[in-house]
Image (cartoon, rainbow, N blue to C red):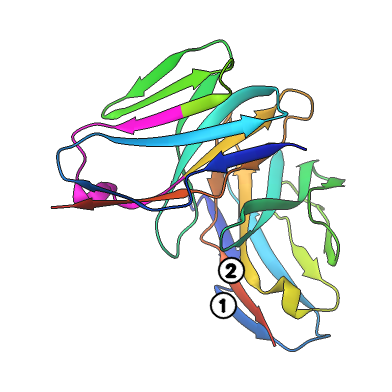
């Protein structure tokens, strides 16, 4: 069956360091992958999209990689700040149906 | 632009009651979706619509109905609420490869 996995354990890092979050998937042929940020009590907010034929995408302090051989995406936040503390969700769009399937999210805590 | 709005923000129901969760968007998007979010489960798709008059089932549609009479509105109906439907519900509309989410409705079914 199709599966998307993100680290369920919270990631705690020190301010200024690079945070790296992982999204793994199985039995899936994604057309593209998205990353969202979700703050407590609020809806997810779109951050980045990367297509199946792209290896890497950057936006300011954010970087996403996409390895369709490993079936994995990595999400990096460089020079992390306490304001980056949130839950980060990955989502894959099926090339067959176009529907988005979400991972369960990883909570990032950046300590000053 | 208000984006995606949802009402109510909070709701408590008794088992067997029915209610409608409202969702509206002002971005003229054709594609809209309803998700539920439970701890450790991520967002799961309930129903979606690709345009006015067209709806389809997602991953967890049982116990929910939707309709899409206009581009702007996409209400979600709980026909006979059950405790298993206690969750946070998010409505989303899809722009160009990006989903815009509403603020959510926190529903408790006793």
User: Relative to B8, is B99 above or below?
Assistant: above
Relative side of A96 to A76, left or right: right
Q: Find the magenta span and give its range.
A: A74-88
Query: Callout 1: residue from which chain?
Result: B
Where does the image place residue A100, in percent across and percent down from the top left? 66, 37
In this view of the protein, which residue sits in the foreground, B80 or B96?
Answer: B80
Secondary structure under the numbered disc 2 in the rendered image: strand
Q: Position of residue A13 (x, y in %)?
A: 23, 46
Q: Residue at x 61, y 43 (%)?
A: A102
Are both tags, 2 and 1, on one chain? Answer: yes
- Asked if residue A17 is positioned above or below residue B38 in the image, the reply reads above
Residue at (58%, 23%) from the top-left corner? Answer: A71
Q: Which residue is mark 2?
A: B105
Q: Chain of mark 2?
A: B
- Report whether residue A60 is seen: yes
Q: Residue B29, can we see it?
A: no
Which residue is rendered at x = 82% and y = 53% of the image?
Answer: B69
Q: Quadrant of residue B9?
A: bottom right
Q: Is residue A104 magenta?
A: no
On screen, residue B54 above or below B15: above
Front residue of B26 and A37: A37
The residue indicated by pointer 1 is B10
Q: Residue furthest top?
A: A53
Q: Earlier in the sequence, mark 2 or mark 1?
A: 1
A16 left or right of B28? left
* Number of residues whose C-alpha sits closer than 10 Å to that of mark 1, classed few (under 14), some (14–19) or many (20 or more): few
Residue at disc 1, secondary structure: strand
User: Dots 2 and 1: beta carbons under 8 Å?
Assistant: yes
Q: Quadrant of residue A88?
A: top left
| Separation (CA) of disc 2 from disc 1 | 6 Å
């Amino acid at each position: 069956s199709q599966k998307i996995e993100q680290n369920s354990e919270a990631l705690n890092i020190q301010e200024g360091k690079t945070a790296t979050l992982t999204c793994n998937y199985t039995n899936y042929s994604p057309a593209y992958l998205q990353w969202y940020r979700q703050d407590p009590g609020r809806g997810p907010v779109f951050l980045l999209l990367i297509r199946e034929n792209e290896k890497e995408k950057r936006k300011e302090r954010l970087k996403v990689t996409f390895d369709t051989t490993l079936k994995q995406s990595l999400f990096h936040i460089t020079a992390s700040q306490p304001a980056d503390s949130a839950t980060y969700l990955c989502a894959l769009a099926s090339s067959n149906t176009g529907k988005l399937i979400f991972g369960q999210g990883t909570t990032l805590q950046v300590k000053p | 632009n208000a984006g995606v709005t949802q009402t109510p923000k909070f709701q408590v129901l008794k088992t067997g009651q029915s209610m409608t969760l409202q969702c509206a968007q002002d971005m003229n998007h054709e594609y809209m979706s309803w998700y539920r979010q439970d701890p450790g489960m991520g967002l799961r798709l309930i129903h979606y619509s690709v345009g006015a008059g067209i709806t389809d089932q997602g991953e967890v549609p049982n116990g929910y109905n939707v309709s899409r009479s206009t581009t702007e509105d996409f209400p979600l109906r709980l026909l006979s609420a059950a405790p298993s439907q206690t969750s946070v519900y998010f409505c989303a509309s899809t722009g160009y490869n990006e989903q815009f989410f509403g603020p959510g409705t926190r529903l408790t079914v006793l």
